[in-house]
Image: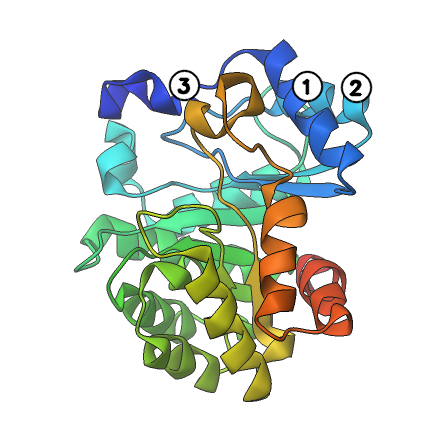
Amino acid sequence: MDTYDVRRNSEGVLLDRAMMVNEVALYKQAGGHTIVEQTIYGLHPDPEGLRDISQKTGVNIIAGTGFYWEMYYPTWLKDMSVDQISKRFIEHITVGFPGTDIRAGFMGELGTHHRAITPTEVKVLQGAAKAQKETGIPIGTHALFTEIGIDQLNVLEKAGADLDITVIGHCDTNRDLDYSRKLLKRGVWIAYDAVGQLDKQTDELRAQSLATLISEGHLEKLLISTDIAGRSRMVAHGGAGYAFLLTKFLPILLNAGVTQAEIKTLTETNPQRFLAGK
């Protein structure tokens, strides 16, 4: 991943493959088996690098395809049609990323602006829904802070997306639990996937929100993860690394009243069911 072109700082530059092998190996030592890797267009993806890391660590890495959000879009995307966008996604899923035989197993994270979805972002969501209907591959979105995930859901649902394999991301960056409830009521998955990011909210509040949603009967549509995309989060740079969810957050969930059986569903059953697609 390399976001320097847009962000102009080194935090989002993760190009040291040897370091990343060590980071993923630490995740495996903590009990991790699979990573959904969403470095897509705009973030400088490296499918060959993912395969190398997976082979050296034994961790399954599921590569995503898609376009992040308009701030990161290549200039040529604006002129593409929904069909052209969809065709590109389908090729990545069924044939492989350009110049490789590595195929995507996920579409995301498909982003939008936080307060409104631009016309080109609408086309990307529509293209993903169209590709999903042909391939049965899950969709995931990037939806920070506001209730923009509802607008994303409206676009995706109208375009024919299968909500059983669609997840609205970053729901834990909006502290209003009713936002999560609104999405869940419509049958889509939601992700509490900013675990460890304390500028959004504390992990204790995340855990309590998850415990509340579980008590209300929503366990089977919840996903959790850490969304690690920065140098400072790496063990090599003083962070807790990919193992944070397993070593730090799961005990917080237990303290919030989530049972071991429910944690197993959150960390094993749900992701397996969601990622299996249709």
**Sequence-wise first label, 2 or 3:** 3
Which residue is pictured at 33% across the width and 57% down the height? 143
- Per the image, the residue denoted by label 3 is 13
Q: Are marks 2 and 1 in contact (CB under 8 Å)?
A: yes
For numbered disc 2, what is the local secondary structure?
helix
Q: Position of residue 48 (x, y in %)?
A: 64, 19
- Residue visible at 53% across and 65% down in the picture: 166
Mark 1: which secondary structure? Answer: helix
Q: Bin the neighbour count of mark 2 within 10 Å (Cα to Cα): few under 14, some 14-19, many 20 and up.
A: some
Q: Badge 1 local density, few (<14 within 10 Å), some, or many (20+)?
A: many
Is 37 situated left or right of 82 in this image? right
The type of residue carrying mark 2 is: Lys
**Which numbered circle lies on residue 21?**
1
Is residue 53 shown above or below 168? above
- Residue 124: image x %, image y %? 36, 51
**How far, Cα to Cα, is label 2 from label 3?**
21 Å
Seen from the viewer's position, the closer of residues 226 and 236 is: 236
**Image x and y of residue 147, in percent:** 26, 69
For residue 187, side relative to residue 262 (left or right): left
Badge 3: residue crowd in 10 Å (few <14, some 14–19, many ≥20): some
Does label 1 or label 3 sit earlier along the sequence?
Answer: 3
State left or right for residue 35 relative to residue 150: right
Q: Quadrant of the C terminus?
A: bottom right
